[in-house]
Image (cartoon, rainbow, N blue to C red):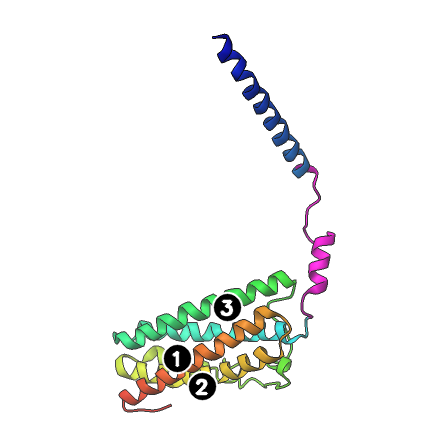
Amino acid sequence: MTSSVRSSRPMMLAGGVVLLLAAALVALMLVRPSSSAGSPSAEGSAATAPSDTSVDVGFARDMSIHHQQAVEMSFIVRDRTSDEAVRRLAYDIINTQANQRGMMLGWLEMWGRAKSSSAVPMKWMNHPFTPRGDGSLMPGMATNTELDELRAAKGRAAEVLYLKLMTPHHQAGVEMAAAAATSADTDEIRNLAAGMVRGQQSEMALMADMLKERGSKA
């Protein structure tokens, strides 16, 4: 009995030390200055972020808009056809481009940059683009009229129109991504843009074959 009590004392002491250390850590966390806006950490992060007029920020903004329409068109055609090949392509574009868009918007947030701008689209790649209006804000983007046509189409007609609209959409996307892959300053944008080029070129080849199978071409 005595030996048991003796052996338990070191454990009790050790437990007390652990509790004291835990309490000290909690106290330090409570008094530790926050790294929110205005703190040295946040200021340092903002200082090293790409500028508002940089390729990185311009690409992230413009490609987020470009991707948003690709996702929208893919959702439309998914509900207008039962063709498994087209639905699979639409599903892949929805998942890939929605994820990439989320990454770009997340970086803009982290860099402390606005997610939209009044600047002329494509200015970051020295290729300012005057929107055609009717929803076509950048090269390759479909107009609102074309989107309405896609919504009204069904079956094979919807498949062909979707593929015809998505092909120039990808062509313009590849041009934008190739410019960012070589001109951006951050590894995040360069790597993402290079991956976009590879992925969308592969999908363009697939869409050309799918159009051919349906007796059409881009």
Q: Residue at x 58, y 24 (%)?
A: 14
**Disc 3: which residue:** 101
Q: Residue 4: x, y in percent?
A: 49, 13
Mark earlier in primary sequence (2, 3): 3
Q: Write down the region rendered in magenta.
A: 30-51
Secondary structure beneath label 3: helix
Q: CA distance from mark 2 to mark 1?
A: 18 Å
Residue 38 in sight: no
Which residue is at the far top?
2
Closer to us: 205 or 66? 205
Secondary structure beneath label 2: helix
Residue kind at label 2, given as amino acid type: Pro
**Disc 2: which residue:** 168
Q: Is residue 144 left or right of residue 185?
A: left
**Disc 1: which residue:** 148
Which mark lies nearer to you, 2 or 1?
2
